[in-house]
Image: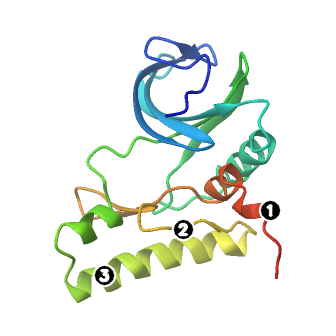
Amino acid sequence: MTQVQGVGPGSVLGGRYAVTLRTSVVPHHERWRANDHTLEREVVLVCFPAASSVAAPALDAARRAAGIEDPRLVRVLDVGTDRGVGFIVEEPLTGATPLSHLLQSGGLAADEVRRLTGEAATALEKAGHRGLHHLALTPSSVLRMSDGAVKVRGLATEAALTDADRLSDE
């Protein structure tokens, strides 16, 4: 498991985001639960080394994604760097289940698959009209909330964090 230096339970990023629990680790970044002490709310931090090759593109992608208003897209609340750590602040997705987990636990009814796919596609089409594309969409990027709502995580940012946005057009 990789570890982003300077991030761990109890650390504070941006002077306001108190890190509590790491929820995932992938090659270029980590996802953490945190508390926003300024607005007194739970948030999710996506953390990565600020000096990494993915940092500048990821921060830029997050800033652009923050301008897209659609309830089906995970909201980017803030971006920044602090003590060598780049971070993207997202809304928390309490009670969300990734499509990948839903499929592993026995699949879904055809009408639910159509609904989830249609909602995700509509949100991504809206973002595409603003010049933002996902480019790294997987079943783990599409989430069903406990109330049935659909959320797509990682618009533009996931591609930047995994270098997928640097692939040749060919």
Q: Is residue 30 left or right of residue 59?
A: left
Could you tell which of marks 2 and 3 lies nearer the N-terminus?
A: 3
**SS of the residue at dot 3?**
helix
Give the residue displayed 55% in from the left and 14% down from the top.
12
Residue 169 sits in quarter:
bottom right
Q: Is residue 111 above or below residue 45?
A: below
Discs 2/1, front:
1
Give the residue displayed 42% in from the left and 21% down from the top.
40
Q: How far is disc 2 from disc 3 in space, using C-alphas? A: 16 Å
Could you tell which of marks 1 and 3 lies nearer the N-terminus?
A: 3
Q: Nearer the viewer, residue 74 or 157?
A: 157
Residue 97 placement (x, y as % from top left): 29, 57
Q: Are there few (<14), some (14-19), or many (20+) residues within 10 Å of tag 3?
A: some
Q: How far is disc 1 from disc 3 in space, using C-alphas? A: 31 Å
Q: Which residue is mark 3?
A: 113
**SS of the residue at dot 1?**
helix
Q: Give the residue type at disc 2.
A: Leu
Could you tell which of marks 2 and 1 lies nearer the N-terminus?
A: 2
Give the residue displayed 37% in from the left and 46% down from the top.
93
The answer to whether marks 2 and 1 mark residues whose Cβ atoms lie closer than 8 Å is no
Q: Are there few (<14), some (14-19), or many (20+) residues within 10 Å of tag 2?
A: some
Q: Give the residue type at disc 3.
A: Val
Residue 160 placement (x, y as % from top left): 71, 53
Q: Which residue is mark 1?
A: 166
Q: How far is disc 2 from disc 1 in space, using C-alphas? A: 15 Å
Residue 88 placement (x, y as % from top left): 61, 37
Q: Give the residue type at disc 1.
A: Arg
Q: Which residue is mark 2?
A: 137
Q: Are there few (<14), some (14-19), or many (20+) residues within 10 Å of tag 1?
A: few
Q: Residue furthest front?
A: 1
